Amino acid sequence: MPSPIPTYEAFCERAKALFAAIPAEFTEGVEDVAVHRGVKRHPQIDDVLTLGECEPSPLVALTGGGDVRSIVHLYYGSFVDLARTDPSFDFDDELKETVEHEVQHHVEDKAGRRGLIDEDDLFDAHARFLADLDVAPGWYRAGRALERNVYAVDLDLFVEVEMRKKEFEALRGKPLVLKVLGDPVEVEIPDDADPDEVFTLAGEGLLQTAEDEDPDATTDDVPAGDLHIVPLVR
């Protein structure tokens, strides 16, 4: 059962306790866990919230020191907003995961690694794609490659279809039949289709993984992603 929404003061106390429970070898160089009352939203997508961030210490920037030192920021208002809109949101679990995630950012920064940065960049690109904002071509290739020209980002599948311009033009107004992960997939190509257009089949992506499913949910209740056909017209 999801935990209740704590007061700001209780949230701060719990955040500090979770941080203190992390071995010192990982938190060395984290100067502070700063908890903000407000909500932090994506600058272009209002319903995408930031729960936490790991920021390089301003002091190091001023002094020009070579050590990696950080400040972990947590946004209480973002947690509250999500908890009020998502009945399954577990406040304490999400806080623990966020604190550990931001400390891992600090550890990776010290080691010169980009694992979490790349994950966060992929999340942002996916959110931008879903909001119909500009994204870099082929951004989804940073996801999981499942087979040739098939990539998974969260529960969404992206399928690249290589074809010549004449082949694409001949497909306008006709169905395109593909085999994706062993299953046949059919998508209608509109008469006025653009070569740069992505064609989406809602609910035809990956199913929610078994360990994340609600044991009381029916098969129809299991969340599924979408399948996106990406023509590569040359």
Image (spheres, grey):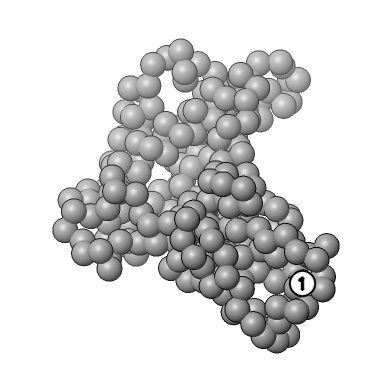
Residue plotted at (67% across, 85% down): 173
Residue 182, given in percent of the width and then of the height, sits at: 47, 55
Label 1, residues with CA under 10 Å away: few <14, some 14-19, many ≥20: few
> Does residue 123 show up?
no
State left or right for residue 229 relative to residue 87. Answer: right
Quarter residue 41 falls in: bottom right
Foreground residue among 147 and 98: 147
Name the spot of residue 49 as percent of width and height, x first: 49, 55
Q: Position of residue 87 (x, y in %)?
A: 27, 61
Q: Residue at x 49, y 33 (%)?
A: 102
Judge left or right: residue 69 versus residue 233: left
Residue 60 vertical placement versus 234 (above, below): above
The part of the image, by quadrant, that contains residue 35 is: top left
Classify the position of the C terminus by image quarter. bottom right
Kind of residue indicated by mark 1:
Glu
**213 or 74, which is in the foreground?**
213
- Which residue is at 73% across, 25% downward? 62
Q: Report helix, strand or loop for mark 1.
A: helix
47 on left or right of 191: left
Identify residue for label 1.
167
Q: Is residue 207 above or below residue 51?
A: below
| Residue 112 in view in this figure | yes
